[in-house]
Image: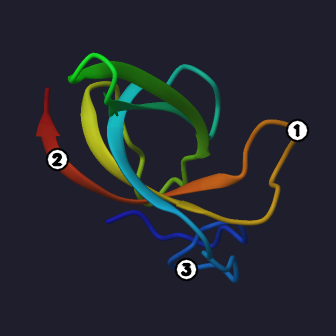
Amino acid sequence: MVECNDVKCAIHGNLKVRGNIFTGTVKSAKAEKTVVVERKLTHYLPKYERYQKGRSRIYAYNPKCIDAKEGEVVKVGETRKLSKTKSFVVLEKSGEKE
């Protein structure tokens, strides 16, 4: 386990998680301390009596103690704005890859 003294870490730092909590797959982990999490959505359309598939991509802060990689399933939680595009933080990873 990596020792974490990151202020923006939700587990070891003093960052409060409030609001929505999502589960999704990490699509990109190329940027430093940032991951792109994609979640799949289904929406029912009563007119056609069918479901519409969609997806949503979320930029999330990736602390060193979690260090999520591409393909892993992670849980992200909403926080205050951390940068221009990030307002989510990775809380845990399931370890399973898709």
**CB atoms at circles 1 and 3 under 8 Å apart?**
no
* Residue 22 horizontal side relative to residue 36, left or right: left
Q: Residue at x 42, y 23 (%)?
A: 55
* Residue 9 horizontal side relative to residue 22, left or right: right
User: In this figure, which residue is indicated by the disc labeled 1?
Assistant: 84
User: In this figure, which residue is indicated by the disc labeled 3?
Assistant: 12
In the image, which disc is placed on residue 32? none
User: In this figure, which residue is indicated by the disc labeled 2?
Assistant: 95
> Quick one: quadrant of the C terminus?
top left
Whether residue 28 is visible here, answered yes or no, is no
Q: Is residue 93 above or below residue 77?
A: above
Amino acid under disc 3: His
Q: Secondary structure at mark 3?
A: loop
For the residues labelled 3 and 2, the Cα–Cα distance comes to 20 Å
Amino acid under disc 2: Gly
Nearest the viewer among 74 and 66 is 74
The residue furthest front is 47
x then y, percent, for residue 75: 36, 55
Q: Residue at x 38, y 42 (%)?
A: 68
The residue furthest right is 84
x then y, percent, for residue 95: 17, 47
Whether residue 5 is visible here, answered yes or no, is yes
For the residues labelled 1 and 3, the Cα–Cα distance comes to 23 Å
The residue carrying pointer 1 sits among few (fewer than 14), some (14 to 19) or many (20 or more) residues within 10 Å by Cα, namely few
Residue 86, quarter of picture: top right
